[in-house]
Image (cartoon, grey):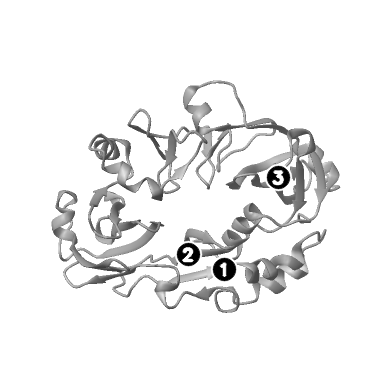
Amino acid sequence: MLYIKGFPETDNESLSRFMINFFAPNYGNPLFMEDGVTVNAIRKGSEEFSPIQYFSYGKVFRDFYKPLLGLEDVSSTLNSLQNKNIKQEVFLPVKPLHEYNLPLVELEKKNRLRIKTMEGEKTLNLPGILNRYSLTETDRLSFNIRGLSKESMAIEIQQLNKKESGSIFLFVKSDFSTVTASKLVPDELQNVADSEELKNFEDLFVKTDPSGEFFNILHSETIWNKKEHTVFRIHEKDVLLSDDGKFVYLNGTKESFKDGIQRIQTIENYKKGNEKYEKVFKIDFMDIAKELNLKADSVNFAHINFFYDDLIVLSVDYEAKVVGTAGFTNVLIDLNEDSDNSKAYLVDLGVQ
């Protein structure tokens, strides 16, 4: 592993995803990319009857954080960027909706969900469709689009007055020929898979292997094995699923992270329980401290903040026996190259 002080010199899709999370956390649900432009649905966190709003970003956003590329000391530039209103200066509202074939989705009185697509319009009576979840006309609801393709959409419904009940997902064909409801738990989705209805919405899911055997359901921990018609979850305490839904980080969690040899597998190999690894590399916390001239005796905490495709972002806090705190850094691990040429960029972005 080559340790480099400063921000990465070159841009790529993984870094762009991280920077979106950095500058606008939890603001949008990415839906798809078209001609270098990523289209998102603005997240709703509270009860709102107004329609889903959409925004896009592309080259303008990449140009926004471009001044950071290759900088060893990012503090001044980063502060300047954080003082800008990225939602107004960079994100572009998508209007009209037919520019990207986006559906109009809004909540009406008595919890009726109105959906308008290029193929038609329909109002779904949620208390009737979601009766088995005890959803009523008076429940306070929030709704978000979590997945979208040319033929299908996935809408997340949350009962704000019954948060312990968990999210319900509506899978809807754009022509309304099929409407299926389920929570993203294996038992319920297994019933959907058994009825063959899950295949109707394959275009919403992330294909995790070239053979098309495994699919990640809406970037969650839930995986569908299309070949075997089974559904399972990746939720073990000692593994972390990548944000793109394709890879499993062994012994890497967001709560605790240990240095040494690191291993990443595809979902296919992880499920088979074999020892075939997509990436194998080594991280040494004390070597990082030496590179940064930190007088550290040990690590106070270390965890993974971000994992998407070939980019991993760590937070590492050091301590010293006498003075206590010894310093902090983020570590941006670029696995785009083979293991022998992997790079780790050491830069304090303040991402704890």
Identify residue for label 2.
40
What separation in Å lies between label 2 and label 1 (alpha carbons)?
Answer: 8 Å
Give residue 73's position: percent from left, percent from top: 81, 61
Residue drawn 24% across the image and 59% down it: 176
Name the kind of residue labelled 1 in the image: Tyr
Q: Residues within 10 Å of mark 1 (few under 14, many from 20)?
A: some
Q: Secondary structure at mark 3?
A: strand
Name the kind of residue labelled 3 in the image: Ile
What separation in Å lies between label 3 and label 1 (alpha carbons)?
Answer: 24 Å
Image height of 225 relative to 17, above or below = above
Task: Identify the image quadrant of residue 20.
Answer: bottom right
Residue drawn 35% across the image and 28% down it: 228
Residue 57 circle label = 1
Task: Identify the image quadrant of residue 263.
Answer: top right
Give residue 155's position: percent from left, percent from top: 33, 58
Residue nearest the viewer, comparing 298 with 101: 101
Residue drawn 78% across the image and 33% down it: 340
